[in-house]
Image (spheres, grey):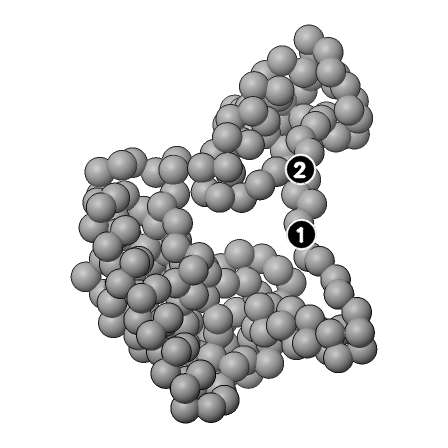
Amino acid sequence: MTQTADNARQRLDEEAIKYVLMSAREHDVKFIRLWFTDILGMLKGFAITVDELESVLRNGASFDGGSIDGLTRADESDMVAMPDPSTFQVLPWRPSKDAVARLFCDIETPTGAPSEADGRQVLRRNLIRAAEMGFTFYVAPEIEYYYDTGEAEEAVLTHRSGYFDQTSLDGRGADLRRDTVLTLEQMGIPVKHSHHEVGVGQQ
């Protein structure tokens, strides 16, 4: 990277940090969840308070990576979660007073090197490899889940709707799917399709 490009990158990083700090103040954010995944794609993370936000944006936050599946060996447990400022988002389902936000993180070693097992790094490496071969590919999740009633005797909505059903049997599920889509869109996540799946209560 040239000196000019490096300086431009630093200016962009500084602007992104200032934007996150300003947004946190404007939305009365008190807690920030630092999110990443283990090698199986399970969401992991820990929370910091807004008082720590600027320092963590600049320097990352240390954590015990040895306890995360596939991330590092037990004798090399210290890892650093380096937040990506472009992923800052207030969580709309949390209270607006002392609000909660999230940042996705890149995982680094204590020396600042990218972790070989970090899912974001794995994706970047494969995008570069595909580009070098003249290919392009797109990545998007297909999320399948169940709505839980919270009642021990009835763990999921037990209506009899099936795949793609658009009937009154799916009333509660359809309303909840609508709320889910609206919440995702509040977070800037576009939804291509939403529908009832095959299983009982499956969306």
When asked about the image quadrant of residue 123, the answer is bottom right
Give the number of callouts. 2
Given contact means CB atoms under 8 Å apart, are the residues at marks 2 and 1 in contact? yes
Query: With 21 as the anchor, is 82 left or right in this view?
Result: right
Query: With 41 as the anchor, is 61 left or right in this view?
Result: left
Q: Is residue 104 above or below residue 132?
A: above
Label 1 CA crowd tier, 10 Å (few <14, some 14–19, many 20+):
few
Q: Amino acid at mark 2?
A: Lys
Coordinates of residue 85 in the picture (x, y in percent): 39, 63
Q: Is residue 168 above or below residue 4?
A: above
Q: Is residue 155 above or below residue 79?
A: above
Q: Amino acid at mark 1?
A: Ala
Residue at the spot x=48%, y=74% of the render?
A: 107
**Which circle's residue, 2 or 1, is located before the other in the chain?**
1
Observer-nearest residue: 35 or 20? 20
When asked about the image quadrant of residue 172, the answer is top right
Residue at the spot x=77%, y=24% of the render?
A: 164
Query: Under tag 2, what secondary structure?
Result: loop
Query: Under tag 1, what secondary structure?
Result: loop
The Cα atoms of the two marked residues, 2 and 1, are separated by 10 Å
**Residue placed under numbered mark 1 in the picture:** 140
Coordinates of residue 63 in the picture (x, y in percent): 39, 73
Residue at the spot x=67%, y=31% of the render?
A: 194
Q: Can I make out residue 120 in this image?
A: yes
Coordinates of residue 47 in the picture (x, y in percent): 33, 58
As drawn, the label of residue 192 is 2
